[in-house]
Amino acid sequence: MPKTLQLSNRRLRLSPIGAVDSRVLEGEGVRYPDRSEVGSPWRIAWVPIRPQSFPMPQVSETRAAVHGRSDEEILAWIDSVGGTRAFLEEAFSGMRDAFVAERAAGQSAVIEWDIATPDLGVMRFGVVVDQGFCRVQPGAAEQPGVVLSLDMPNFLRLLVGSLDGPDAVAAGALDVAGDRGLAMQIRQWFGASEQLD
């Protein structure tokens, strides 16, 4: 069962490796895990605490907000749900949670996402897949096998499946530097996103 440690505006999430449920626990007070609980059988992740006035949307809401919308409309919607930083942290947290270890069996990869935002410049996130686990970290990835660069609206379109990776590359909306074969594989490693009609 996951345990939580809250520090200022972040929670430390401790989940037993192999746990099915890795949601952050809500509760009264702060419980500091002892050293034996933070040892190797635990996976550790920092989880941003979202302001209560900006609950993050569900996937269906996100798809509806993106489908057929202009870049300006998408950016305005992102502002309405908490802004760039909160939205990207939630998107990458969701990506980590959607990871399906069986689909990436025997694979390891370091992927860097460079997302051009209108208010914070280029925000980088590293996604590391190794030994059946997926870890997401803000900032540039160390020795990425592939770097995927795109703007915020197209990142969101790609994320919800309304933009196809190869089509995005052909249209110049997505730049792939490094291992293109890896870039083609990664989508298969994450939970299927239904295509919009």
Image (spheres, rainbow, N blue to C red):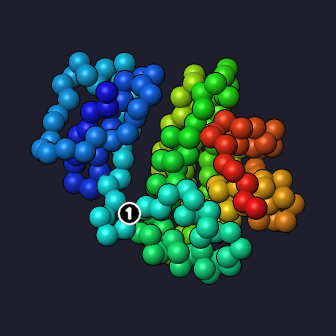
Considering every residue shown, the one lying at the far front of the view is 197
Q: Nearer the viewer, residue 57 or 108?
A: 57
Residue in the image at 66% along x and 48% along y: 193
Give the left or right position of residue 141, taking residue 162 as reference.
left
Give the left or right position of residue 25, taking residue 161 as reference.
left
Badge 1 density bin: few <14, some 14–19, many ≥20, Cα 10 Å: few
Image position of 184 with respect to 43: above or below: below
Image position of 89 with respect to 151: above or below: above
Q: Nearer the viewer, residue 61 or 99?
A: 61
Q: Is residue 169 visible?
A: no
Residue in the image at 69% along x and 50% along y: 194
Quarter assignment of residue 43: top left
* Horizontal and vertical percent position of residue 152: 61, 67
Residue in the image at 68% along x and 79% along y: 70
Q: Nearer the viewer, residue 194 or 160?
A: 194
Residue type pointed to by label 1: Pro
Q: Secondary structure at mark 1?
A: loop
Pointer 1: what residue?
Answer: 55
Q: Is residue 54 visible?
A: yes
Quarter assignment of residue 21: top left
* Horizontal and vertical percent position of residue 118: 56, 75
Q: Quadrant of the image for the C terminus?
A: bottom right
Residue in the image at 31% along x and 69% along y: 53
Give the left or right position of residue 184, taking residue 95 as reference.
right
* Horizontal and vertical percent position of residue 4: 26, 38
* Horizontal and vertical percent position of residue 187: 70, 43
Q: Nearer the viewer, residue 144 or 129?
A: 129
Quarter assignment of residue 71: bottom right
Q: Quadrant of the image for the N terminus?
A: top left
